[in-house]
Amino acid sequence: MNQPTDTSYQGPLRVFSGMQPTGNLHLGNYLGAMKNFVALQDHYDCLYCVVDLHAITVFQDPKELTQSIRKVTAAYLAAGIDPKAHIIFNQSAVSAHAELAWIFNCVSRLGWLNRMTQFKDKAGKNRENASVGLFAYPNLMAADILAYKATHVPVGEDQKQHLELSRDIAQKFNNDFQVEGFFPLPDPLITGPATRVMSLRDGSKKMSKSDPSDFSRIGLDDDADLIAKKIRKARTDPDPLPETLDGLEDRPEAQNLVSIFAALSGQTPEDVISEYAGSQFSAFKPALVDLAVEVLAPMANKIKEFDDTPDYIDSVLRDGAERANAIAEPIMREIKEIVGFIV
């Protein structure tokens, strides 16, 4: 268990993380996030959120958004998150997220947000047409975490900058209002050998929901036949697997498949290379197919079962929101009193 680096905070260890309900979830979401979410349950009190407020920073079709919220919830459950021992809820159901985000809009600085590389990437050349929500997204992320005084956040490399901003906002709030240690400075949890899963069609690009090719990713609801077909068609190179990891340095597709095998099997990439050194992909891919089907096909079956029980999914979210609100409400009352609001 990771102890917080912020020794001024003396509260309980708590994990918060969330996933956007946009597009179809894929292997990268599972290996980069959900698999770790499940493992963290044994060590922390965990809150796992479907971040629907973040999703609407770009326009979402309302009916599709409703279904996507349920789909992410189903994936959390299918992956093995226990909704009784921990908390699964959708962000918009707990008002503390939006309330604290506004307070943090007034604590955070424009210069800090201007340095956020993800806004530049997502807004592209149409920066002036981007929503204010997309620009202020990192402040809402800080509110998501700090509304529960979470001490640890499992994040991918692409979110580390936002988490660092959350720490800056927490520190500035503590300093501005002279309440040292009120907010913890949340620490990142980056675990596992495949925290960044790449496209099956181009090893230089991250596996993405938005890639036009369905064969660039393995969907969490893909059946066994489709999983096998996508792995067989995954781009590779003609050389055998090397003796050491260094031999994968300029072979992104090979490196990606080895990393996926390692993450699915619970091994290190070194273990995989040691076992398959000298093998051609004609031998390695069938082994990866068998492993991926063994791990992922049962999850796909569970997701399909949950798709047929939306009332159950909604009940999980309602129960989670009630329990999340029970944590956040007294914290928000304290925050309002610190700021000077009459409550």
Image: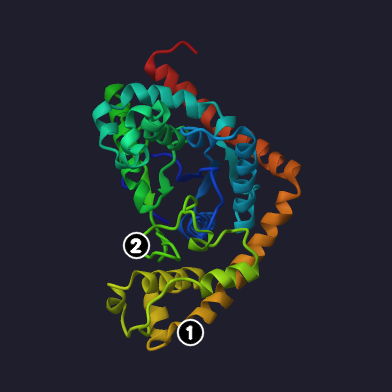
Q: State the residue in front, 217 or 82.
A: 217
Quadrant including the N terminus: bottom left
User: Disc 2 on helix, strand or loop?
Assistant: loop
List x then y, in percent, for residue 37.
Answer: 51, 54
Disc 1 is placed on an element classified as: helix
What residue lies at 38% left-to-right and 56% top-to-bottom? 190
As drawn, is 134 to the left or to the right of 77?
left
Residue lying at the far bottom of the rendered structure:
278
Q: Is residue 77 visible?
A: yes
Between 246 and 173, the one nearer to me in the picture: 246
- The amino acid type found where label 2 is placed reads Ser
Image height check: is 129 above or below 236? Answer: above
The residue that disc 2 covers is 204
Residue wearing tag 1: 282
**Residue 112: quarter of image:** top left
Q: Residue 127, percent across and down?
A: 33, 32
Q: How many marks?
A: 2
Relative image position of residue 77 (x, y in whole percent) = 63, 52
| Frontmost residue, 156 versus 208 | 208
Q: Residue at x 64, y 66 (%)?
A: 297
